[in-house]
Amino acid sequence: MKIYRPALYAVLAWVALLNTSSAQELEPRRWSHVPVDTNFIGVGYVYTSGDIFFDPVLRIEDATASINTVAATYLRSFDWSGKTARVDVRVPYQKVVWKGLLDGSPAKAVREGIDDPRIRLSVNFIGAPALTGKEYRAYHASHTTNTVIGAALAVTLPLGQYKADKLLNLGQNRFVIRPQIGAVHTRGPWSFELTGSVFFYTNNDEFFNGNKLEQKPLLALQAHVIYTFPHGIWTSLSAGAVRAGETTINGEDKEDDKEDFLYALSAGFPVSLTSSVKIAYVRGRTGNNLGSDTDNIGIGYIKAF
């Protein structure tokens, strides 16, 4: 099955290129118009390294993390009352090595296994009619300037590796529910994309050694400037910010509102009519005394059928 190339490169952004937190993802082209009744499968790898800043009460200093993540993604586009919709499932596998000083002595922790999977449903309700084949190609040929607006709901499932007697885990042992709204305006080879998200967290009643973890909603905003070259090659410059999300342990506010900033550069290019590769670099920096400063390098491959 041959897939119109711009649609394939747009969906490539869904290959899982993970960061240390799902709130720190920068995903360009997530609202791009794609043909309906199309399947995409992908695999991605990302290497993350960085400094981790813990609450001083934990007595952990000079902490660093080295993370290797491999993730598989499946995406299906379909017709939702004449609008283009898609659902995707992402399952990551991670190996994480934490190092630092615990009470002044060198310490190390290693975790390896399945991280929390994520399911996402999105609908482009303006500017993206449900089309296939020749109709889809004709629409884009006659709409070189176009605006797409969409909404989505992503849910992270608490199925990853988690041990209640460990402070450091791969999974979160709680649901994360993330409504999103976004828009992308395309004018010739240029596209300008903006996405806003709110993260809602259920409680973790089995947090470290029998404690209860609660977290207030987290706000995230990201923007992308994308340029598409001839033959379907594209590049994107991205920036994002994360705010709020204070945590509470056993009813005590930790005063740890997030203030994170992210920057990314990514590019995609075809390897065949139905497959493509994406590479990306993401830099994340915290604006307060808690959180993480990370550098991420990733590569992803996707195939349409």
Image (tube, rainbow, N blue to C red):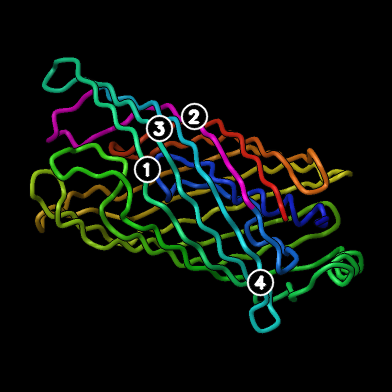
Give above or below for 26 relative to 142. above
Q: Which residue is mark 3?
A: 293
Check whether the beta carbons of the residues at disc 3 and disc 2 lie within 8 A of each other.
no
Q: In the rendered structure, which amino acid carries the disc numbered 1?
A: Ile
Q: Is residue 104 left or right of residue 198?
A: left
Q: Which residue is mark 1?
A: 114
Give above or below for 88 relative to 127. above
Q: CA distance from mark 4 to mark 2?
A: 33 Å
- Point out the image quarter for the N terminus: bottom right
Query: Few, some or many C-alpha atoms within 10 Å of disc 3 (few <14, some 14-19, many ≥20)?
Result: many
Q: In the rendered structure, which amino acid carries the disc numbered 4?
A: Phe
Q: Which dot marks residue 47?
A: 2
Residue drawn at (84%, 52%) of the image: 189
Q: Is residue 215 left or right of residue 118?
A: left
Residue drawn at (61%, 46%) of the image: 42
Q: Which residue is mark 4?
A: 78
Choose mark 3 or mark 2, whichever is in front: 2
Q: CA distance from mark 4 to mark 3?
A: 38 Å
Q: In the rendered structure, which amino acid carries the disc numbered 2?
A: Tyr
Residue 100 appears at what percent x and percent y?
24, 21
Check whether the beta carbons of the residues at disc 2 and disc 1 lie within 8 A of each other.
no
Give the secondary structure at mark 4: strand
Choose mark 4 or mark 3, whichever is in front: 4
Q: Which stretch is magenta?
A: 41-61
Residue drawn at (58%, 42%) of the image: 43
